[in-house]
Image: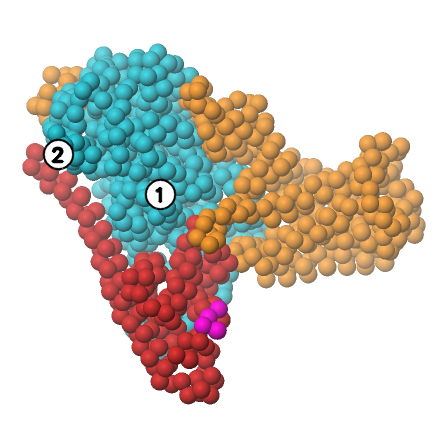
Amino acid sequence: MGMLFSLVAVIALAAIAFIGVKLGLLGLFGIILPYLAIIVFLAGFIMKVVKWGKSPVPFHIPTTCGQQKSLPWIKQNKLDNPSSTLGVIGRMALEILLFRSLFRNLKTDMKDGKVIYGSNKWLWLGSLAFHLSFFVVLVRHLRFFTEPVPGWVNMIDAVDGFMQMGVPHLLMTGVVLLAAGGYLFLRRVFNQQVRYISLAADYFPLFLIIGVALSGILMRYFIKVDIVKVKELTMGLATLNVSVPEGIGVIFFIHLFLISVLFAYFPFSKLMHLGGIFLSPTRNLVNNSREVRHVNPWNPEVHVHTYEEYEDEFRELMKEEGIPVEKE
Amino acid sequence: MANKPKPDELLSNINYKPPRTQWTDTPVEFKKGYYCYAGRPNNLEYISLPHGRKWSSTDDDWQLVDNWKEIFLEGMENLLKKFRSFRLFMDICVRCGACADKCHFFIGTGDPKNMPVLRAELLRSIYRRYFTISGKLGKIAGARDLTEDVFKELWYYSYQCTECRRCSVFCPYGIDTAEITMMARELINLLGCCTDWISGPLANCYRTGNHLGLQPHTIKSNFEYMVDDLEEFTGVRVEPTFNRKGAELLFVTPSADFFAEPGMFTCMGYLLLFHKLGLDYTWSTYASEGGNFGLFTSNEMMKRINSKIYAEAKRLGVKWILGGECGHMWRVLHQYMDTMNGPADFLEEPVSPITGTKFENAKSTKMVHITEFTADLIKNGKLKFDKSRNDHIIPTFHDSCNTSRGMGLFEEPRYVINSVCNQFHEMPENTIREQTFCCGSGSGLNAGEIEELRLLGGLPRANAVKYVKEKNGVNMLSCICAIDRAVLPPLVDYWVGDVDVCGVHELVGNALIMEEGEKREIDLRGEPLPGMEEKEEED
Amino acid sequence: MKIEHILLEKKQVIIKKWFDLILETYPAETAKFMKAQRNRFGNPVGHAISEGIEGLFDELLQGMDHDKIALFLDNIIRVRALQDFTPSKALGFIFILKKVIREELAKKIRDNKLFEELMAFESRVDDLAQISFDIYMKCREKLYKLKASEAKKLTSIIMQRANII
């Protein structure tokens, strides 16, 4: 149900953009909605992070995934069980850039009576490809918002198109993004466990991103648009000097609208894992809770059963057994 | 339910197809052997948990208070404000499913709601409905109204999680189901729905200082039995002291270690070790429990129970505290105690009185794990062992969840075992260390009425034990946890057979040479040592 | 001995169907998981079933070695004894094999007039069922013994305490 709902929703969004442009609402789709989306994205993102930040971390709860630092002659696992800030930075970097935990995804198999440790790295590979290519695609798009285009953006472009196939050159990341997105979708459908837990909120962003990638690829290679005019519009957006040139082509507005929706939807969705991962207390804390006291800002006053109360109840019995007491 | 299957149904279990509904609409069915008994009102009252009453988890009417929904939702809002982990973990799960098959309860029972992600979704569906904007869209947004059925379901599955944190190792965002289960149980306790197996030990512990409710004189006389046995087995008379002011160290261990087999054998190991060292230490009858069922109840309850350890250390004027072999006890000591009841500025930074080693990693909390302590002694050559006394034992080692994933204590116990045994074998790689499989009975689930659930939850662990038994002839499952020592024996008895369970310090006690030329013919279990018998015959 | 040949030829098909039908005695979502993953440590339940039934099938065709059969049955039944099945449902998986074979071999049996051999084979399946009863009861007895001994441990503590006091 969630899948169908999300698919219909994304198609409807594309249709809205199509109809809107045909009705001549270029200003709405080219200027107002993108600005709105950016504002909602930024404000929503910040508000969410602030909301997380407002809740304190009362206890020191890193998940330790390697040998602790204890005696000097025992080799500590400094990345999976860090005892210093540097170690935590390393752990977080591995987690954020290389998806360390997903990489762990192992499975054990029996073959001919022997244990085989097979790795189950498809999810790791798929997600890494998905996120990395998304990131590069995003960076590549800087060339629409800068003039002159910085050298490093051009370089990324050049590397991305190293295959030098077709005109214009085929950019690998767009294809990888689409393929990885497709893998993540198919996995959701065909892996029974994942399908059972999937919600509309899982399919919708996936379809949306696939929609963005598809419309982008269509625009670049198949239904070409006037790239000079597109840049005129995007530069206008970037420099707050807006205008919508005539005759850009409707596919561009569909692309732009889907992106706007993605940005506006972002802070209210699971996509916020982008910000959340940095704050995850099981990963970003140093495992030194016996070495340095962690302070809980709301450490509650509680009623305890004191030794005095205890001795009052058991004094005679204790004395009989020769256990020392405070009051004879 | 279907006690009388129709004749056709018999041959055809086959045609049985359950309704293909979404999880949000599949009602919970309380299976026999899978749910705990309800907590008794007198116990709840004793530890000031609200809304105690006589009820049963199979009742249709749980007799929740009229405004239970408000209490639950207010409580939830309160916890969201207090715990970043909770708010974050409610928001950022992408349902990638990496955790799904990492849970021992899911592997053992196959119940999809035991996938960590889905167990968390039970609470997340309520969170979305009442605390997010998109949740107002209802079902399509994965939101659910809080109803009595939804609450019962949450209760049922909150007590099918051992808070072992294995899923959190594999989660790309470190989402920790233990944390979510803890929050769920906090909420459950606001409504007086604690289980009997948790509230009983809690009430005992609050009153007498230990789970079993042992009063001071009982503790002492129990030790006397143990000391007599030990003398009979080893010829050494040890003299433990209780509540002794001015001792250098306070020793705290789970009370099961001095009351139940096979924990008592571990305790004998401690006693021999301390005697050999001439350690100036004392036991306490007031702080006579290392374990802390408050961890499975609420953060306040945990603090109340835990307070006794520092209070007693202060009263007795010891320098620092040594802690015995236990799993969740060490989660509390390592990650919570100093925060809750510290700073322990009345204690000194721990230094081994025998080797002079400073335990830098414990300088604030001032509590050292016994395997850290013993490993240091061995490394510095302070102990002599006759490893052959353990030659009838082929041990493997079960990493406890809490010392593994809440601490990272891996090499210390292995070093100790290898120093006292000749034939140690590891279980398969992804069933040990940070990937260790739970015993299936942690977090207050070692109740008799859920034996079936526990045996199924422990199946992945038992399976790995069976593997090394067949491959390496392993006959002993060693561990550093009192719950393990209580629950692994029935677990391996059911699934594996002919494998015993022991604490690491039992092995230490067996091999430890108390004086030169000492001859030992029986082990700490009072059983004859096979090799030694033969020698006698030869003589 | 012709039926053995046919059964051997069709071994993979029969075992697969048998396995699938056994899994259908579990709730759908559980079954899917057990089907998807068959390794010993990740999915011990599914592994025990798939390994067990293959071994049983081989034994039915070859030696009917009682010890081996008991071992394979034990691996499967030990799990099912804990899973809130009625005894008939817990052991029904044995009889499913009969159904599978009748369906799969119906035509060949008719064509080759193998009814007598089929009956002989089926009575071997019945032998499995008899052994299964013993194992099932043993598992349940063990379960209750474990429960009782845990309860006894508690009372013995109380008794001991009473004596001391």
Q: Which chain is mark 2 on?
A: B
Q: Which chain is red?
A: C
Residue sitting nearer the eye, A315 or C122: C122
Q: Position of residue B456 (x, y in %)?
A: 35, 52
Q: Which residue has dot 2 on it? A: B537
Against A59, residue B22 (above or below) is below
Residue at (80%, 50%) from the top-left corner?
A: A216
Tag 2: amino acid: Glu
Against A107, residue A320 (above or below) is above
Q: Which residue has dot 1 on it? A: B472
Residue sitting nearer the eye, B247 or B197: B247
- Residue at the far front: name it: B538
Quick one: label 1, few (<14), some, or many (20+) residues within 10 Å? some
Q: Main secondary structure of the magenta part?
A: helix
Picture quarter with the N terminus of chain B: bottom left
Q: Secondary structure at mark 1?
A: helix
Residue sitting nearer the eye, B300 or B20: B20
Question: Quick check: do tags 2 and 1 share a chain?
Answer: yes
Magenta region includes residue C146: no
Q: Position of residue B335 (x, y in %)?
A: 41, 28
Q: Which chain is cyan?
A: B
Magenta extent = C8-12
Q: Colour of chain A?
A: orange
Let me know if residue B64 appears in the view.
no
Residue at (13%, 22%) from the top-left corner?
A: B237
Let me know if residue C23 appears in the view.
yes
Task: Mark 2 vs mark 1: give the one in front.
Answer: 2
